[in-house]
Structure formats: structure tokens, C-alpha cells
Amino acid sequence: MTPPATVEDVAVHGLTDTIGVTIPNPLTCEDVPNRRAKAGKLNGGVAAATNSEFFKAPAPHKPLAIRLDHRMSQEAKLRKSTVLKSLAKHMATPGMISLGGGLPSSEYFPFESMDIKVPAVGKFLEEETKTTGKTMHLGKHDVKEGKSCASGSAQMVRWVTEHTEIVHNPPYRDWACTLSAGSTSSLEMVYRMFLEKGDFVISEEPRTAGLQFVGVKMDSEGMIAEALDELLENWDVATRGARKPFLLYTVPTGQNPTGSTQGRERRQQIYKVAQKHDLILIEDEPYYFLQMQPYTGPGAEPAPLPKNHDEFLKSLVPSLLSMDVDGRVIRLDSFSKVLAPGSRCGWVVASAQVCERLQRHGEVSTQHAAGFSQVILHRLLDEEWGHGGYLDWLVNLRVQYTTRRDALMKACDDHLPKEVATWTPPAAGMFHWINLDVSKHPEFGKKSVAEIEQAVFRTSVASGVLVTPGSYFMADQENELEKVFFRATFAAAEFDTMSEAIRRFGLAIRKVFGLPQ
Amino acid sequence: MTPPATVEDVAVHGLTDTIGVTIPNPLTCEDVPNRRAKAGKLNGGVAAATNSEFFKAPAPHKPLAIRLDHRMSQEAKLRKSTVLKSLAKHMATPGMISLGGGLPSSEYFPFESMDIKVPAVGKFLEEETKTTGKTMHLGKHDVKEGKSCASGSAQMVRWVTEHTEIVHNPPYRDWACTLSAGSTSSLEMVYRMFLEKGDFVISEEPRTAGLQFVGVKMDSEGMIAEALDELLENWDVATRGARKPFLLYTVPTGQNPTGSTQGRERRQQIYKVAQKHDLILIEDEPYYFLQMQPYTGPGAEPAPLPKNHDEFLKSLVPSLLSMDVDGRVIRLDSFSKVLAPGSRCGWVVASAQVCERLQRHGEVSTQHAAGFSQVILHRLLDEEWGHGGYLDWLVNLRVQYTTRRDALMKACDDHLPKEVATWTPPAAGMFHWINLDVSKHPEFGKKSVAEIEQAVFRTSVASGVLVTPGSYFMADQENELEKVFFRATFAAAEFDTMSEAIRRFGLAIRKVFGLPQ
């Protein structure tokens, strides 16, 4: 059992104006089987129509999302549905023989069955899996059922909807989930849903090139809300040559490249600015579940681990989605950093209006997430692990990433020259952002900042360590570089070699800055 | 050994002006191991840069593709590459420790291994697979290697390049293959590569809504070349409100919905018109390998099967790609109808210029085909079956589809009222297009054609058979319907029920048209 919604919950969720309505408990992992039993059999056949609404708790106390018609691009307004999908409903008639479909019979596909070995819940380490791992069996007809229309398979939509309700419980009524072919694909679709030629997108300051971005200053907690407000307050259409931007892209947790994480209060501030200026917030969260244990410093006692699912979820910085009383957040969710890179199967949480437009777009482009990915992920997440087992897996990742982050922090502490190198220990994600004080370089002023950065990069590579220069992430590669940063990933290298890598990087910095070795 | 290129080959491939150059034999399935052995080890690691050029035969006798700069949209011209990919080259240095990547270590992903049961070569039937099927084992580190950058995994690019050379041997030099997230996704990218707002796309006449299409009249062999020429010759910018179209979309083989297939000569005529008007041809070919044995009529002896790979390939109508001396064909290739629906892993064959732009687009949208799909398909096609085994699989499908098509033709012959129903037996694909002579309807002239079509549809559904009304495929749903067609798929229904389905459809037609039952 979970406690009833607290005053704090109500305040966060913006429900203070609904006093008198019985607010149901938030959904927990343990509640899911009950809810499903009540809902009855899922229609999960090939190309079955599906919708998050089938899987959500009724929430008449929540407000409806604001309509975004006034923000839709010409292209998005024109997307139409196809009449062909209407044939599917006739297949429910008993005895009906269909010559109407467009998909061959499964006997003409050669994949008979798959057996996939995965860790058992609670035995997540690679060496444990060898002995205690479970084998999931998928038959050809399961694959057939996992293959689906542009909404994605009904089973997977149900899972992501339940997961979203458990983790974020969005505070407006008509939120929805739609499967995607990965967040990069969704992001491109969202841009096309709202942008006309020449429009700006607001984003964190360092940002790789592509669209027309306008950057907002960051501190160690990422985007600064006041800077955002100021940018919008002072937007001048004439000098900018574009209408005031209304689409904001942000990675609130473990941002790439800086590794910064917006705290709860920062997110609330940003949301308020979004309300003031009627912004749409794109919350891209591949690293949300790579939030680590608090950093306690070199040699200090580690913080105690969350004892259960509830404590784990409460330990996470709440998402923008969980504060979104208006339905102005478009959350991009992904398995790419926690389950499988390149599964090209993610999902979007947004208002039903936005999800419907994404589905129409998907019908003429990506169609749906790959069938292989859908069935494999669904089998693992739903049938093998369940919601609770997935949270256990994420707690396991939290422990692993904390250990790695702490090892990298110790290595930086041991080997980087503190006269020039500074950093904030990352709270989430896989990236560590190291600042070098370029003014300490003996030829500062004579050499350009870009030249000094490249000297550090080249010397590092020659010393046998690869770190990514900050300039690689700057939206405007033509502008003169002002600061020197390097990004180090602590999620990828062999654990034992991280310390050696940082030792080499430290030596390279000393060499370029003329410091004693 | 294969015979040297014949005069016919040379004529088809447009190489008559290269007399004096030694023309190498076309690549065969048997040659592939040799070529690979000569090429040495494939660099197939994570995010390895790859390119069709690594895997093609040198062909100095072939002309280079025409440049398409003058056709590129503003958007396509502006796409940039990301500097981040340049880091990968440093990983080749021995002893290098990377903190530069963006992908977690594989120990943090839970898929330990997969065992996939598939048919052995030559034992392709479902019941055979139960006893003689092979099990392919994929370990976690294979998956890691299959995961790749926007070009797709090197191994899969190699396979599709070799396959393309074996089947189509494009007659210009700088053709290339690039992996896609399915042909619908590629098609959308191609449209965005060339179209500006308001532009028309040329296509076959019946065509579902979406973009701005201009239809070309068809006969039983699909699009009519003379009609295409006439359309372009008489294009009037003022009345059309758009520049003369230069992008043509066609499904030459087993077109959906009509099931029509362009013969060799028809394709040559269309290609000539394309040269005359400087068109870019999008050749969408999901059904290319569903070309069936010639239809010999009810009760007649079946035509003899191809005896080997060479005979099989020669039995296929040559692709537009195989005639493309200019590099103006963009071929969309797919596994969705022959190996796995919804794998979302296809490929595009086009000039290197076009493929490069597609890759840049992919980097900011679909990224790459799903890793699960890539490794599973590659393991089957390359390591388990090989090129020859895949062709054997396709011959097997040819036999199966021929049997089904012939059964459906017999059912139509037995049960449809020939006073009103006419059809051409399809040569390829999975669709049968049945024409009803609406002028024979007792209330023709009083009722609209659309009303008669819907009456047949409703009566069919009430009789327990689902066929797709032709009007569902008309681009312009507002225009008045002139003809009544129904599309029947012979690839999907239980084999034994197809005859019953057509019997019911025949009864429904008789009822609506007031014919004796």
C-alpha cells in the first residue's frame, strides 16, 4: 500500500483548486495486475487500434491540456489519416475471411522462434546471468502480434502508459503515450509539428549545429530560468529576423555535454517561465534513470541506497512532465541508455492532441518502432521483469553508475592539476564536464582559445586518452571560442582504465599549460 | 562460373559506347567469398565508418552519375555533418583509452544472448523447420558490433551492396547503398531532399492521399510511358500553379493496389521519357521478389521452375536500376514482404551523392535501422544462408505465391460473374485487382458510382468477406468516382478459405447487380 497523496504532491501537481474531488492514490507497480484484471482482455492483434486512454486511471479531477492549434505548423495541420485503417474493425466479425490486408501470412517469414537470455530480477550482474539468467521464448506468432500499426503494438503502449503513470503521474487529464522510432526521430517530428522556416528553437547554450538555435546561459544546474525569461522578454523580432520563439528543447537530467542536472526548484522556475511566455517544453530524458546517489566526496561514507520502489522514485528529481498542469511538456523517453542502444524504440508523452499528430506523421515516415525491438523489449519489461523488476534493474544501474562516477571523481582529484582544472561532480547521466582556466595558459592572449583547446586535445590523444573537446558541441562553430571544456564519459571505458586515462589527461594538461609534471 | 556478359546484357546496361574496355563478369553468389577474401578484414566495430565503395567491384568502364545539385531542396543543401564522428578514427591507435564516446559499456545492457530458429537452406517450409531448422546464436558482443552509426553496420551495408551488384549490377560507377529505417521513411526523406512547397510528384493514377500528386494513366502493365511524356510535354506552370515536376514515384512490380507489373520494354520506355525530361525516378520495390511463375491458365501445365540462381535472376523483369546509365534512379528496397514485416530495416540504392544526403538526414532523424533487426537479419542472410541461400528462399516464395495466385485465379474463374467482373492475372506481388463494370448495374445513372461500390462492399462484408474498395486508394477522395474496383490479397488468408471468400464475394456482386444467384 502507498500513502495517500500528500499535501506536497498536491502542491507539486497543481491540484490545489480541486479540493472536494477524491484524488486517487498514484499507481504503483503492485497495483498494475489489479488494474489489468479489471480492464479485461487486451485486443493486441496485428494492427489493432490502440490508445493510452485504455490503460490510464480515470482522472476527472485533473484539468484538460491546453490546445496547441495556434502553434501548429502548416504541414502539421494538413496531415490526414488513411481510410484503409477503417477496414480492421470488420475483422472482429466471427467467420469473416479477409482478402483485404496488406501483410503476407506468417508462414512466409522465416523466423520460427527466439530464445533470449536475460538477467533474473535481482541478479543483474553479467557473471550472475551466466548461472541464474532466464531464457525468454518468443514464437513466430508472438512476433506477428508484436508487429503493429503506426500506434505501435497495444501491449507496448500499455506498458509505457503504466510506467509513465507510476513514475510521473502527469497532473492533467488527457496525456497520452505514443511509441517512437527513437527520440531523435521524435524530436525531428516535433520540430516539424511546430516550426516554420526561419523560426528559432530555444536550448541550452552549448548545442551541436543543425536547426536555428538560440542558447540560454547555464550554471551547474543547467539552464537558468531568469536568463530564459530575459531572453523572451527582450526578444526583438526586427533584429532577430524571426518571431518570438515558443519551442524550448532541454535535457534536464545529465545534460549532454555538460552533465548538469536541473534540481526540482530549477525545473519549477523554468515551468513558470514557460507558462508566462506560453512555451512548449521538449523534455528529452535519455539519462533520467541514470540519476546517481548523492556525491559524498573522496573517502566519505556513501549515502544509503533507496530501500524500496517508492523510496527510489522519490529519490529522483521530478520530471517537468510531473509538474505539467497545462499539457505543454513533450517528453521524449528512451531505452537507449538503460536497456539497449539502437533498439530504435522509444516513446513520447504529451497531450493527446500532440500524440495524434505524431501518429499521423509516423504513418508516412517511420511507421512504427521495429517489430523485433518491440517484442523483445515488451517480453523483458512486461512478462519477464514486470514494472517492479524494471525499477530494480534501474536501481542496479544507479549503483553501477555511482561507483563509476565516484571512481572518476577520485581520479580527477588525484591527477588533474587543480590550478587550471575545475569541475562539478555530475548528479546524473554519463558525462563529466571539465573546465580548464585558459587564462592560466602561458600564451593566453597570444594564442586563440581554440588553439589552446586543440593543443590539449592533440597532446591528450598523443598521450593515449580520448576526451571530447567542448568546441565540438558549440552550435556556432564560426564564433570565436571563449572557454575550454572537455567532456569525459565514465559509462564506457573499462573500469580499471579510467584512472589511468585521467592520469594521462592530467599530464597532457600540465604539458600544454607548462605546469610541473 | 557464369558466362561473360552477353550482347543483350551490354545493350540493356547501356554499355555499347565502352567497346575496348574489358567488362568484368557480373558478380555471382559464388564469387562473393573470393572477393571478400581479397578485400581483407572488415572494420565492423561499433560506429565504424562504412561505405558501399569498400564492397563493390571497380568499374572504370562505367560512367559517373549525373549530379543532382540543381534538384536539391534548400533543406537538403543545408544539412551538415557532425564533427563528433571524427573522434572515432583515433580509436584505431593501440593502447588508446576512450572517455570520448556517448554509449555505455555493454555490461549495462541486459540482453546476454539470443538463439533464433530459422529454416535451413532448401528446407523452407514451416513443418520442415520444426525438425531441420537451424539455431543461430547471437552473443551480447555481436549485438554491440551490430549497433552502429547513421550509415548502419558495416556488415549489413556490405551484404546489401553485394546483393545489389548480384541482382541489378547498376550500369554507372558511383552507385551506393545506404541502410534505412524502412522504405516509407526513406521515401519521406527523398521527398524532402527534392521538393519545395507546392511541388507535384508524378505517380501511378490510383494513389492514396498525402502529398500533391499528379497521376499518370495505367494499363495492365502499369504506368503508360506515352501518357507520362504527354503530361510533361504539356505541363503548364500557370494553370498548374507549380513548376514542371521532376520527381516520379513508381512501384514497377506488383503495384499496390492494382497488382500490375511493368514489363522490360515498358520500363525502358519510362526510362527514356525520364531522360528526355530529366526526371528522378523513385523505384519502390517491396514486391520485386514476389514475381511469380507465368500464369498458364486454369488446368494448364505449370511453367518449369528456374533451375539455378542464374536462371532465377534472368526470370525477373529487370529493374529500372539495372537500366540506369545516368544515376537518376533511387531504388527503395525492403525485407518487409519477404523476410520480416516491421523489421524497419531496408536500404536505398542511388548515386553516392543522394546516399550521402540521406545519411546526413538520418543523423538528425531515424539515426539507423534498429540494432536488433540489423543483427538478426545479417546473421540470417550472411552467416546462415549466404547470398545463394537467400535466392533459394526467394525461389521458395515464388513457388508459394504462384500456388496461391493460381488458386485465387481458379476461384475467380469459378465464382465471379463474368458478365460484370474482369481482371488480369497478376504477375507479381500479392494483390489482385478486380474490375466491376458499373454500367451493368440496374440503377446505373440513378445511383452514383460511389454508392454502387459501397453497396458491393457492404454486401460483401455482410456475406463474410473483406475486400478493399478501390476508392480507398484514390488520391482525390473528393472527386467523383468513375470506376469500381476491388483489391483482394492472396498472400494473407488461410489457403483453404480463399475459394470460399471469392464465392461469397461473387454472391455479393450478383446480389447488388441483380444477377441470378
Image: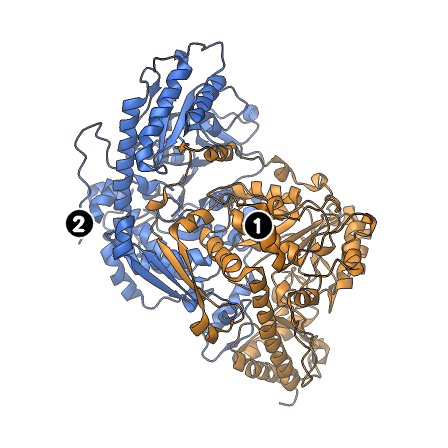
Chain colours: A blue, B orange
How would you rate the neighbour count of disc 2 (Cα within 10 Å): few for under 14, some for 14-19, many for 20 or more? Answer: few
Residue A515 position by quadrant: top left
Residue at 50%, 31% (x, y): give it. A213
| Image position of B212 (left or right of B143) | right
CA–CA distance in space, label 1 to label 2? 67 Å
| Image position of A56 (left or right of A242) | left
Q: Secondary structure at mark 2?
A: loop
How would you rate the neighbour count of disc 1 (Cα within 10 Å): few for under 14, some for 14-19, many for 20 or more? Answer: few
Are the residues under marks 1 and 2 on the same chain? Answer: no
Image quarter hosting the C terminus of chain A: top left
Label 2 near label 1: C-beta < 8 Å?
no
Residue at 54%, 69% (x, y): give it. A101
Residue at which label 1 appears? B37
Relative to B248, does residue B488 appear above or below in the rendering?
below
Residue at which label 2 appears? A3
Q: Position of residue B274 (x, y in %)?
A: 77, 52
Does any portion of residue B196 appear in the rendered image? no
Image quarter hosting the N terminus of chain A: bottom left
Amino acid type of the residue that numbered disc 2 sits on in the rendered structure: Pro
Residue at 38%, 64% (x, y): give it. A138
Q: Position of residue A368 (x, y in %)?
A: 48, 55
Residue at 27%, 32% (x, y): give it. A407
Relative to A490, does residue A312 appear above or below in the rendering?
below
Q: Secondary structure at mark 1?
A: helix
Q: Is A293 in front, or is B31?
A: B31
Label placed on residue A190:
none
Numbered disc 2: what chain? Answer: A
Q: Is B120 in front, or is B475?
A: B120
